[in-house]
Image (tube, coloured by chain):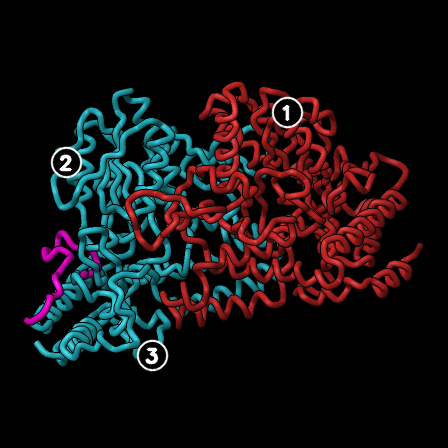
Chain colours: A red, B cyan
Amino acid sequence: MNRDDALALDAADPLAPLRAQFTLPPGLIYLDGNSLGLCPAAAPARLRQVVEQEWAQGLIASWNQAGWISLPQRVGDKIARLVGAGAGELVVADSTSVNLFKVLSAALDLAAAAGPQRRVIVSERDNFPTDLYIAQALAAARGLELRLLEQPGPLAAALDARTAVLMLTQVNYRNGRLHDMAALSAAAHAAGALTVWDLAHSAGALPVDLHRDGADFAVGCGYKYLNGGPGAPAFVWVHPRHAAQVRQPLAGWLGHAAPFDFAPDYVPAPGIARFVSGTPPILSLAALECGVDSVLAAEPLGGLAALRAKSLALTRLFAQRVEALAPATGPALTLASPRADAERGSQVCFSHPEIGYPVMQALIARGVVGDFRAGAAGEADILRFGFTPLYTRFVDAWDAAAHLGQVLALEEWRRPGFDQRRAVT
Amino acid sequence: MNRDDALALDAADPLAPLRAQFTLPPGLIYLDGNSLGLCPAAAPARLRQVVEQEWAQGLIASWNQAGWISLPQRVGDKIARLVGAGAGELVVADSTSVNLFKVLSAALDLAAAAGPQRRVIVSERDNFPTDLYIAQALAAARGLELRLLEQPGPLAAALDARTAVLMLTQVNYRNGRLHDMAALSAAAHAAGALTVWDLAHSAGALPVDLHRDGADFAVGCGYKYLNGGPGAPAFVWVHPRHAAQVRQPLAGWLGHAAPFDFAPDYVPAPGIARFVSGTPPILSLAALECGVDSVLAAEPLGGLAALRAKSLALTRLFAQRVEALAPATGPALTLASPRADAERGSQVCFSHPEIGYPVMQALIARGVVGDFRAGAAGEADILRFGFTPLYTRFVDAWDAAAHLGQVLALEEWRRPGFDQRRAVT
């Protein structure tokens, strides 16, 4: 295979036209959509409309006339189509951290009602820190145990009659490892436990089917593969068999059954709407809708199944090319993401014991944007490359690998301009 | 006094030029800034910059290069100047509801540590519902009592050795009654209790001095008198003597002492930064900064003391004119906000037992925008008029009263187009 073959793959790619939905700086190879998605070309005009018309001219009437009041549900229904949830089952609200607090709290209530012996939250030691921090806070407040397992390794075997909740991020933020949601949810349910899934690195990147795969609760992020803009609001889903029974602790006025009655006592809205707390940030929420629409635009072209096939082809190509080009001498880059398609999300990671940070700076100077994550004590640093199939081309994967090969072969990372420290401090 | 006198007051008003900072529909008299502030004229350009440059072109690098990462602190420091807080003591984060959960939870932890007998949260029955709902949820979770007092009425007398926290909104959202923060905080402290103040209807409308007036914790809203845009993020302040000691339960990654270490264990940031939870909605946060800047622009002109003097003059004028013009026959409009300046926030309310809803619709049809709040069982409906001194003119107060007088005198509210139901349903 050569570069022309990569160009031919793009020419034959039925998803290729979706790239035109986005604005990106000329010449940039952007492999960081797993951290902040590109700006949809529709977003500037939509934001102008929201600010200059709906806010400045419509003012308070826009809550009804511009539909602001139903945005959490409207955008939620769109995201639902991407994660195998039904209409009316998912809302946009708050941040992933705050939503995780709501659903984990609700799940722990259910588990406590099921049996006082269910006192353990099981998760993964390398889960995204905010998930661990929220779980630590709730475990401490309730006198529960948070059991963190090393992955890859046996997870299902750790689930037993003491397990309250299995809480996992479907795709690991550092190494891109993809959990088998169906198998793990089945194992949790077999043990009588509930499941909480964080879809931060999977929603919009690969097919998710919350109903089919046995999720009880889920949260996810708006600004990664959903292209919702910096700090876009997050989403929250609760299986309908739980949604009407559970309480969520952040009982804000917009989750009330009749918020505009301004009644003194809290009565939760019938279903998922109770997971809305305060007034949502409309400007950011409007941008998120543009981002979600950019993913939904793939539906007539095969949707997330087609995007997933392209994502796997992109990540395979990039990993193979990097391994082919990396110099054979000196400390080597090691593939840190799973080689097997079924175990990999939409990113490729390489670890290096020493030069990860200056290498990423040299790559960025060449116009290839990935990111760097320092390894914990005893672990190697990670170079992280996200391949959003909605806008990343095969030639981008080809060229990014070529640039990385050049940075290493020419020892470009040694240049004085690049910070030689091992890790960001 | 006649309309020319009102125009003369505007001509002589040193604050009058501040109105030019805002965009508003021609001819509209907007008396709903206590619900959604006007759009600062600077906001559209700033949002274009954030969306089209910082997001679309700067992408992930904008977290540092455009200063997104420090926006919660930067905007927080600006708001601090409006509420008598020091730099580094206040951050922007989440919604008012969510922030109230954080601070009330932290305050209850401190109270529990002070003594197991402190098991009562004291508040006002007519507090804004979200405050009551959050307190109800926390009281239920911790087995505490929420004691709600009718106001006006004795509050300090209800504080005793069983009181954990006095939680109040400084200005009541319905009737505009202003609590004496200094006296009530002193009474709470004398009883050994802590204070939590919600500044939703006071920040940006009148001088607030959290340090001088003995607040322990405070939260506030970004989209009312701070003109931050629909659903703008809220703010949270904790007295420095508490900030470094308390835990807040929504322990998200951005409140960590070193968020970019991605460490598995939560270590709270040294001070108020621990009250940031997840990633903030940058678009909405950028708009909020424009709104806060619009209030800070009054600083060289006397700041909030000058704005407060104008606000009181506006609300006095409006209340007097309405009372002078309202027909003497039929069910009367009754002033529902306090007549004494020292007891009134920046709004004027009238109650009517029957026709409040169609009267407000008729007023809006005339281009005078206030809002309507249905009375609870046994209480009269409220017509609410907010007077944001930053952009409301004396002639607006004059004309709004004249329109209201006309709507009543001509029985314009009887027109078929206006919904004759007593209350919104």
Residue nearer the viewer, A229 or A236: A236
Q: Secondary structure at mark 2?
A: helix
Identified by mark 1, the residue type is Ala
Q: Secondary structure at mark 3?
A: loop
Task: Name the residue: 32% across, 22% down.
Answer: B113
Tell if the residue under mark 2 belongs to the same chain as the one under mark 1: no
Whether residue B257 appears in this view of the structure is: no
The C terminus of chain A, quarter of image: top right
Task: Name the residue: 56% across, 60% down.
Answer: A289
Q: Which of the 4 image quarters holds residue B246?
A: top left
Q: Which residues are magenta?
A: B328-350
Does the segment drawn in magenta span residue B29? no
Q: Are marks 2 and 1 in contact (CB under 8 Å)?
A: no
Task: Decide: few, some or many residues near mark 2? Use Cα within 10 Å; few <14, some 14-19, many ≥20.
Answer: some
Q: Chain of mark 2?
A: B
Q: Chain of mark 3?
A: B
Q: From the viewer's perspective, is the residue at label 2 or at label 1 nearer?
A: 1
- Which residue is labeled 2 in the image? B156
- Which residue is labeled 3 in the image? B26
Task: Name the residue: 21% across, 41% down.
Answer: B213
Identified by mark 3, the residue type is Pro
- Which residue is labeled 1 in the image? A191
Disc with the residue nearer the chain's start (2 vs 3): 3
Identified by mark 2, the residue type is Ala
User: x and y percent of residue A173 in the render?
Assistant: 66, 40
User: x and y percent of residue A297 in the render?
Assistant: 68, 63
